[in-house]
Every structure is written in structure tokens, then in C-alpha cells.
Image (spheres, rainbow, N blue to C red):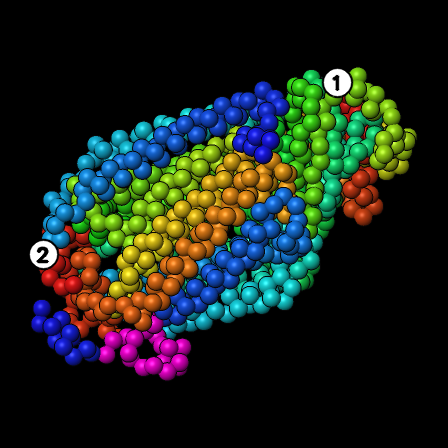
Amino acid sequence: MNTAVKTSPDVASDYAQSVDALYAYLLGVSVFFTVAIVAVIIFFTIRYQRRKADEVPEPTKDGKLLEILGSVIPFILVMIMFFWGAKLYFDARLPPKDAIEILVTGKQWMWKVQHPNGKREINDLHVPVGTPIKLTMTSEDVIHSYFLPSFRKKMDVLPGKYTQLWFLPEEEGEHHIFCAEYCGTEHSLMIGKLHIVSPEAYEAWLSTGGAVSTVAAGDDPVLAGKTLFEANCTVCHSGMPGAIGPNILGAFGTERQLESGESILMDENYVKNSMLNPNEHIAKGYPAAMTSFKGTLNNTQMGQIIQYLKSAAE
Amino acid sequence: MNDAAVSEDAPRINYLTNGFSVKSWLLSVDHKRIGILYLIAMTCFFALGAVAAGLFRLELATAEADVLANDTYNKLFTAHGIIMVFFFLIPAVPGVLGNFLVPIMIGAKDVAFPRLNLASWYIYMAGGLTTLGAIMLGGIDTGWTFYTPYSSVYADSNVIMAGTGVFITGFSSILTGLNFIVTIHKMRAPGMTWMRLPLFIWAQYATSIINVLGTPVLAITLLLVVFERGLGFGIFDPARGGDPVLYQHLFWFYSHPAVYIMILPGFGVVSEVIACFSRKRIYGYEFVAFSSLAIAGIGFFVWGHHMFVSSQSEYAALIFSALTFLVGIPTAIKIFNWTATLYKGSVVLSAPMLYTLGFIGLFLVGGMTGLFLATMATNVHLTDTYFVVAHFHYVMVGGMMMAWLAGLHFWWPKMFGKLYNEFWAKVGAAVIFFGFNFTFFPQFIAGNMGMPRRYHVYDLDYQPFQMLSTAGAFLMGTGLLICLITLVMSLITGKKCGRNPFHATGLEWNKADSPPDTHNFTEPVNVDVEAYDYTDERIYRDA
Ligand SMILES: [Cu+2]
Ligand SMILES: [Cu+2]
């Protein structure tokens, strides 16, 4: 063997390093207690070995103090784990405002990726170093899970719903992309490479047509979404006089008031749900007049409308 | 003891010699015979599950596909999971040891509803054979978790039949649970107060509660999947307005407590064995008894820890993480109490004791690695990787299976009246222990390195660990064979034993023959001692 066996995962970000620090704490605590308890058991089995067949040991009294100590110490140690783990988890959830948004669609058994300018790639993902990347993900069929082991991050990718995963590539390099949720026959082939390249190389890559990618006008999700919006939504939803629906151009990302008195964040899932089940949430001051676009617009088209609404709010 | 002396001179008819026809077994309402029926059926299911594992471990020895096609691989790990979880791990200890021992340990002649008990076995078999049929007629490739919409819409396999099989078997768990609860409440002998119950009974009681409360949810969930698949319901399918994550909530609402259904009876076994082979009352008896109930209760509110990356709300995840740590504490203290029981005891490393100490070691690793998965940030990285696979095998195989074998060896002389070869039994225990660690320890490392579970082919970086795993699996298989041969041989060549060969406390050892009479006791039972009173000299009289 000329290559050493690797025993730990690659580290591709500060976040990965902080997860590893937590992992080390967990490892320390568990190794300490496992070794201690096993040592005590071995010691007791040897020290208190039965010497005579008829020996009967004195019964021991239950010690309340020992019992309490035995509960309090582990309690403190695991509370540290809990808060530390929760803090990192919440940090890892909120994408920064300046993140580049890339669309990922899972499909048995490939990852379809679309960059902001419409350029597509399959399975692999190219990103520029130094800029936070936000993946907005959905699935065309079953549940998949986008897993970046070098970043210690993964997120399920679901049909009928958008989920997000963000990460900050801090160094140029190549890393694994795995599908982590079992999705059928070729689950283990639903893998790709993450290419972290310099911003210049990323720009250059974006503007060239690769083997699996072409940049055509129809591919730009925002443009396509604009056309669809104008054909299907404008009459009610762009603030025309006498419109029977609220103006939603520019409203993406804001809290919307509902007839029920509640409010709801206008995000990907809300918009998509409104297209499918318009009467679930009625906007304040408007009638429940919209009909469902289920069957009229497909998944991709709804995604394009969402992208248009997002760009209209910037 | 006059009666005992009589029974040695002229052996009276015991439950084994009370009829030899097949019918006398298949229609028996004797809880002991039903226990043996479970033992035989379960051993067969276990063997099938183990063969499936052997096949896919062979495939996983190298990174490329070389032994099995991807679909075959997927069907094998699914078959392994379904068979082991639903037809071995969940029913093993309650079905075999619970049936055999619960009535005897509390001083009853049988369970409260003997016919229902027999019906439970038939339901178990009906479910098992239906699922087995699905596996034989083309197989299922959904994984034992049956996640939607893969199972309900996309999977190209016998989901309806397999789901129906598991659904049917669920009723066996529910009815057995019900039977035990009523038996323990209503049929205890005079003097057998709650605080004198063996801890094995407390564990069975807690398990039965989870079975009765949790299993119906699994049954309904699987029924919905079957309906969705067969009749086009849209509960979990987003294309029809359903929610696939709802399935996960329902599934884990049962399947997390199911971990306790598997492990709590094991805890009960461990308490009995440790007390006997260190001749001490279990340290903190009350605590161990009530912690079983606490685990059963809190265990129902932690299911979301399987779903930290499923898109459930972050705040829900936060609560589930906190509660998961909470449920770990009663478990930790049980380990502490078992260890403390050894202190100043009179310890013998017999075969059941070796299995039990093996259990503590492995379960300890399983529990500790559970902390990594309860912690939210590390969970995100480790979930759905081999780390999880290793973790639950340490809990369920290292824990439950070792406890099951400890119990089987401990009560074997009681069940069959024969002693096994102690040397080979110990060899079996040691080989299983080392084989197990070889198999599953490397998987923690592969998992932390990012290797996803259920991968048919994988990156070369993971190969050394997978190779070790495969070698370990075959070592473990050898250990299991040694164990099987030793036990079977004891039936043929084993030395006869008396009532209480290990000098243990408890009614099964002190008031019932080995093997027990058809009606369990030949004399009226009256309990006048506390549990685990090893200073009571009566237990040292008979061997
Ligand atoms: Cu997959
Ligand atoms: Cu769980």
C-alpha cells in the first residue's frame, strides 16, 4: 500500500472546523466514560471474583448521594452538548443576504443544477471561492438529500416543497456531493463533484457552453418566469386598477397580512402553495377568487415564476 | 424440600412431555409451549435475516459492484432490516422469554388470556409469512423504513404485500402487550407485591405499554401506505396534495419507541443475570424499575431526532434534541446501577454473565454515539451515513441481541432441564463479541468520513473500513453458529439439572421444576421475601 488510509473527512470551511470541534468534545466525553465504566467493571469482576462456592456477600445499601451525583454530572455534560449543537445548527441554517442562489433539482438519479444566468450542469456543481452559496432545492420525484460531507452539511430535497442549503466555500478544491436519502435503484450513483474555483474562473465557466450546458434565452428562469407571469398572473397581481388580487411584484420576502388576521412570510413554499391551493391563505381585503394552477403550470414553470418574483423584489 | 425430592425419584410429566404430537404443540395454550413456538419461528427468521446480511456484506467488501446487481443489493438490505426489526428484535424477548417467564415469575399458572396468547403467535406467523412471501415473490426495495413517496408511488416492488405483513404482525405485539399488562396486574401470587417483582417483569410491563400505545400508529401508517399504493390515496404524495414528511412523523412516532420495545426487555434480562452472578440485589432497585417506565414515557416524544434535515421546523428540532438528551439520562443511570451491583459482590463469569457484560460494553458505545446524533449540528453531518448504521447496530444488536443471548443461556436449563457445555458457550460469546466490534466499529469512521448508508457502490476512501466490516460479519456469524450448536447439542447430550443450578432468586428457580410442570407449580406459591434476597439460604439448597 503506498497511500495512507484516510480516517477523517476533508475540511472545507470554518463551519466544518467548528463542527469538528464539537465532535471532538463529544468524542472526549464518550471515550472517557466508556473507558472508565469498562475499567470499573473489569476491576470489580476480578476484585470480587467468587472464591468459595457458598460465599454470600453482604448486601449493599443504596446510596442516595451517589445516585444524585450520577444524574447531575451527566446532565451538565449533555446540556453543554445540547446548547453547543443547537447554536451551530441555527448558524448553519440562515443563509447570508449576499449569497449566490443556485437552483438544484433532484431526480432519480441525478442532480440538475441551474446557475443564476441560466447555465445548467448535471451532478457537478461549480462555485466561486469566497462567496456564500445558497442552494434552493426541490425534487421531481422521491425524497433525496443533498450532502456535502466536507462542509458537514446536508439537507433533504423534497417533491412539492423547496428547501435550502447554504455554505461558504473558502478554498479552491474538489469535494464530494452525495445523495444521502435512499431513493431507489441507483441511489449510490446519484453523486457528483463540487468544484470550487476562483471567481474569474467561475465567470469564465458561466459564459462558456460545456458538454451538458448551453445558455439560451429560454433557459433564463427569470425571463421565462416573466413571460409566464404576464400570461397568467398580471391581470390580478400587478396592481392594475380594479384588480381583484394583491399586487405581489416586489412583495417577495415580506410578511403578508391574511384575512384570518395572521401573517405569513412570502417565500418559495408560500408562492408555490398559493398557485396550487389558492384558498388556503386569503390575502387581507381580497376575495377568495383565485383558482388553482395545478395541471396548468408544471413544476419547472412554477419555479420560474418564483424566480421572477424574487428578482422583481430586489 | 419434600416435593423436590419426590420429583427427582419419579419424574412427573412436565410441559415438554405433556403430549408429543404436532397438534399438541400447535394447539397448545400453555404459555411455555407458545414461548418455544416463538423460539423456533424466530430462530428461522433470524437465520434468514443473517443470510441476507452475509450476502450484501460480501458485496460491500469492495467499492465496485462485483457480487450483486444494484436492485438485488437494495432488496437484500431491505429484507435484512424488515426481518430483523419486525420479526426478530421486537418480538424476541417478549415472545420467547416473556411468554415463558412472566407467569412463572409472578407465581401464576398461565397468562391472563391463554387462547389470545396462542392467537398472537398465529398472527405473528401470518404476518411473517406474508412479508416473507413478498420478499420471495420479487422482493421489496424500499428499505425497512418504507419512506414515501418512494414506497407509495415509485418503488418497483411488492410494497402492498410486505406492508400488509408488517401490519398484521403488529397486532401480535399489541395483543401480547395487552395480555402481559393484565397478567401482571391481576395474576400475581399472594405476597408478590409490585416492589417484589423481578426487574424483568418491570421491563416487560413497560415494554407492553409502549406496544399497546405505539404499535397501532405504525399499523395505521402502513395501512395508509398500502391504500395509497393500491387505491391511489394522496395522503403522502405531494402530486396529489399530500405531504411525504407526514409519513416520517407517523413512522418515527412508533419506530423510535420501538427501539425501547427492543431494548427494555433486554434491560430486564441483564438485571436478572447480574444479580444472580454477583449474588447481590440490583443496586437501586426502585430506580431501575421506574426508569423503565420513564423511558417508555419520554421515549414517545423524541421521534423528531430522526428528521433534523427533513425540513421540519428548526424549533421542533430544538425540542426533540433536548428531549432526546433527557431520555438518555435514565438509561445512563441503569448502566451505573448495574456496575454498582458488582461492587463487593461474588462475581462469576459464566456464559450468561459474559453475554451480559458484553451487552454493557456494546450498549455503552451505542448509547454514547447516540449523543452525537442527539446533538443537532453533528446530527446534520452524521445522519443517513454509516455512523447511524453503526450506532443502531450497537444499540439493537450489541444491546438487544447480546441481552437476548444472555437470557437464552440463563434460562435455557430452566426451559429444557439440561445444562449446555459451559466452555463452548463462553467461546461463542467471545467470538460474537469480537466479531461484532470488527463489523461495526469501522463503520463509525466511514460514517464520519461521509459515507452515506444504503450505497451499493462507493468511493475508494471507504473501502478499508468496509472490508474490515465484512470480515467481522463472518467472524460474528461463526460465533452465532458456535452458540447455536452448543445449545442444540445440550438438548441431546446435556447433563440434567435440578431446579436452581445457578442458585438464583425468583419463583421460576425456587418453586418450579426444570423443565416446569404443565401448571408451572406443584405446590401453592406464597411470596415471603423481597426481590433478589441472596442472603436467603433456601436458594442454595437445590442444584
Ligand atoms: Cu438517493
Ligand atoms: Cu430514535
Horizontal and vertical percent position of residue B275: 22, 50
Residue found 47% across the figure and 34% down from its top: B372
To which quarter of the image does residue B190 belong?
A: bottom left
Residue at x-position 28% and y-position 75%? B15
Q: Which residues are magenta?
A: B13-33
> What residue is shown with label 1?
A198
Position of residue A62 measured from the top left corner of the image (x, y, whole percent) = 18, 39
Q: Nearer the viewer, residue B184 or A309?
A: B184
Mark 1: which amino acid? Ser
Using residue A167 as the reference point, say whether residue B314 is left or right of it.
Answer: left
Q: Nearer the viewer, residue B340 or B301?
A: B340
Quadrant of residue B67 within the rendered picture: bottom right
Is residue B232 in view from this perspective? yes
Depth check, front residue: B283 or B502: B502
Amino acid bearing label 2 = Glu
In this figure, which residue is indicated by the disc labeled 2? B537
Label 1 sits on a secondary structure element that is loop
Label 2, label 1: how far apart the Cα atoms are: 81 Å
Counting from the top left corner in percent of width and height, residue B109 is at: 25, 70
Q: Where residue B177 appears, x then y in whole percent?
A: 38, 60
Image height of A156 relative to B14, above or below: above
- Taking the image as shown, residue B119 lies to the left or right of residue B427, namely right
